[in-house]
Amino acid sequence: MTIAVTGPRSNKRVTMDIEQLRGSAAFMERAIVASLIATLVAGAALGITTWLSFRFSRAVFAHEYAAIHLYKVEVGEHIAALKQEVSRAHERAYEFEQAAAEANARAAQAASESATGNEKARTAEVGAEELRNRVAELGKQLREATARAPAPDARIVAAEPPPAVTKDKLASESDTPSAAAPPLPTPPSPIVASLKKYAGTKAAVYVLAEASDAPAVGATISGYLGDAGWAPLTWTWTGVSGILGVTVLIKDGNDPVMDEAASAVLDALRSAGFNAAKGNWPADWRSFRGALSGPQTAGPTEAPIRIVVGSKAR
């Protein structure tokens, strides 16, 4: 029987295996570290990308929100402009309707006045024809009465003969049938009637010399006041310009009656179509610019109410 004897193993081979294991372990450690670093870099990159994506999303959202808000504002302004245009269109349509209604009313009034005028003309023609027939009949009766009248007795002392009645006289008397009846009193105008309540009030009328239409307007206003029983006096005001329309001025410290009278004058002038306004004298009541020429019976600054007539009073 043969017995094989194995000798001891070589230490060198064992050592090489350990070194290889150590090298492998070191390599694995480096690989793990590199993998960890790569993982950290990837995580950091992912975080940065996520952060950038979030910032970009917020920027895009803010931009979209601003754009939408601006669009809403523009749409709101456009809608408001459209509403204003619609409102103006409604106002113009209403004005056109009012103008059309007024034109129709004026046309109807003109037609009525024309019909009334035609009727009056026909009535006048009928009245004239009846008058002519009446004059002819009276003339015929006069001739017949003259033919039938007896000759006067010579023994009768002639008295003063009555006035002769002729055809012309009869025609003249027939042409004026209303001469026997007294004329009816003319009612006062509404302006005069509204001012009669304050009869006796003193008023100074200042007419601007530079306004060409002011004297006629001042005379008209003074006539209204005089017919209402006021005491108006007119002065021509020179050295002053730039006053438009008719201005009713009152003195500070007037009693309420004078204020009411000034308001009544203002309302009456406006109702008559004057461009009238009310105000206060800008300085002391007795001071004025320029010069006033007019009556010498009273001072131009004594009246408690002043009516200044400028250009474009109507």
Image (cartoon, grey):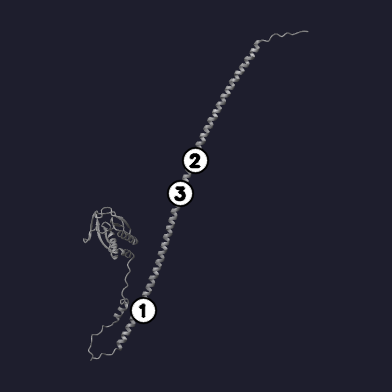
Q: Of residues 256 and 110, which is closer to you in this image?
A: 256
Q: Are marks 1 and 2 in contact (CB under 8 Å)?
A: no
User: Which dot marks residue 65?
Assistant: 2
Between the residue at mark 1 and the residue at mark 3, the CA separation in whole angstroms equals: 74 Å
Looking at marks 3 and 2 on the same chain, the residue that comes earlier in the sequence is marked by 2
User: Taking 176 as reference, is 40 left or right?
Assistant: right
Between the residue at mark 3 and the residue at mark 2, the CA separation in whole angstroms equals: 22 Å
Residue 180 place in picture, x, y as percent: 31, 77
Residue type of the residue flagged with mark 2: Tyr
User: Which dot marks residue 80?
Assistant: 3
In front: label 1 or label 3: 3
Looking at marks 1 and 2 on the same chain, the residue that comes earlier in the sequence is marked by 2
User: Taking 296 as reference, is 47 left or right?
Assistant: right
Q: Secondary structure at mark 2?
A: helix
* Vertical order, 255 against 133 (above or below): above
User: Taking 146 as reference, is 80 left or right?
Assistant: right
User: Which dot marks residue 130?
Assistant: 1
Q: Is residue 116 visible?
A: yes
Q: Quadrant of residue 290?
A: bottom left
Residue 96 place in picture, x, y as percent: 43, 58
Quarter occupied by the C terminus: bottom left
Residue type of the residue flagged with mark 1: Glu
* Vertical order, 86 against 130 (above or below): above
Residue at 41% from the left image edge and 64% from the top image edge: 105
Residue 248 place in picture, x, y as percent: 30, 58
Quarter occupied by the N terminus: top right
Q: Of residues 91 and 227, which is closer to you in this image?
A: 227
Q: Residues within 10 Å of mark 1 (few under 14, many from 20)?
A: few
Q: Secondary structure at mark 1?
A: helix
Residue at 30% from the left image edge and 78% from the top image edge: 173
Residue type of the residue flagged with mark 3: Ala
Residue 187 place in picture, x, y as percent: 33, 69
